[in-house]
């Protein structure tokens, strides 16, 4: 845990969130600034600053997060969805605690 990290505070239940999934390693909650009808985050409970800070010891956790994304997306009726991991300030990361965005629903997502 990092004392200054908002996601660590959410994990510790020090800050409220719209959490809808939790297990021993991760939590999932709705984004406070959604860009799609469904937009949630999957966040590991242990503090890792970004994807660039991961190493071989994070392999199982990263796999778990990626496999969890479609299961949680299906709970919201998404047949298709997008995942995004912003890494570093230049990569658009705003909260420096590893997290994956999962979003979809409607036709609002830009085509890349």
Image: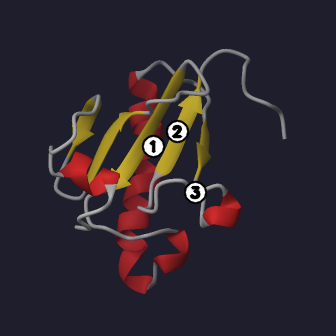
Q: How many marks?
A: 3
Q: Quadrant of the C terminus?
A: top right
Name the outermost residue toward the front: 4
Residue 8: percent from left, percent from top: 26, 57
Q: Which residue does the numbered mark 1 point to in the structure image?
A: 69
Residue 35: percent from left, percent from top: 61, 27
Name the outermost residue toward the right: 112
CB contact under 8 Å: marks 2 and 1: yes
Dot 1 or dot 3, earlier in sequence = 1
Q: Which residue does the numbered mark 2 point to in the structure image?
A: 102
Question: In the drawing, what numbered circle is on residue 87?
Answer: none
Give the SS element for disc 3.
Answer: loop
Residue at x-position 56% and y-position 18%: 37
Does residue 81 lie above or below 43 as drawn? above
Q: Which residue is nearer to you in this view: 4 or 66?
A: 4
Dot 3: few (<14), some (14–19), or many (≥20) neighbours within 10 Å?
some
Give the SS element for disc 1.
Answer: helix
Q: Which residue does the numbered mark 3 point to in the structure image?
A: 93
C-alpha separation, residue under disc 2 versus residue under disc 1:
7 Å
Give the SS element for disc 2.
Answer: strand
Dot 2 or dot 1, earlier in sequence = 1
Q: Quadrant of the N terminus?
A: bottom left
Give left or right: position of 17 versus 70. Answer: left
Residue at x-position 45% and y-position 54%: 99
C-alpha separation, residue under disc 1 versus residue under disc 3:
19 Å
Q: Looking at the rendering, which quadrant does residue 65 occupy?
A: bottom left
Residue at x-position 39% and y-position 47%: 42
Q: Looking at the rendering, which quadrant does residue 108 occupy?
A: top right
């Amino acid at each position: 845990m990092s004392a200054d990290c908002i996601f660590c505070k959410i994990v510790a239940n020090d800050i409220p969130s719209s959490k809808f999934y939790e297990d021993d390693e991760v939590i999932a909650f709705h984004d406070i600034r959604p860009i799609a009808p469904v937009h949630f985050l999957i966040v590991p409970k242990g503090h890792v600053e970004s994807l660039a800070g991961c190493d071989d010891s994070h392999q199982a956790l990263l796999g778990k997060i990626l496999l969890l994304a479609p299961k949680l997306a299906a709970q919201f009726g998404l047949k298709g969805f997008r995942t995004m991991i912003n890494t570093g300030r230049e990569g658009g990361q705003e909260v420096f605690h590893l997290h994956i965005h999962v979003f979809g629903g409607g036709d609002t997502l830009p085509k890349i």
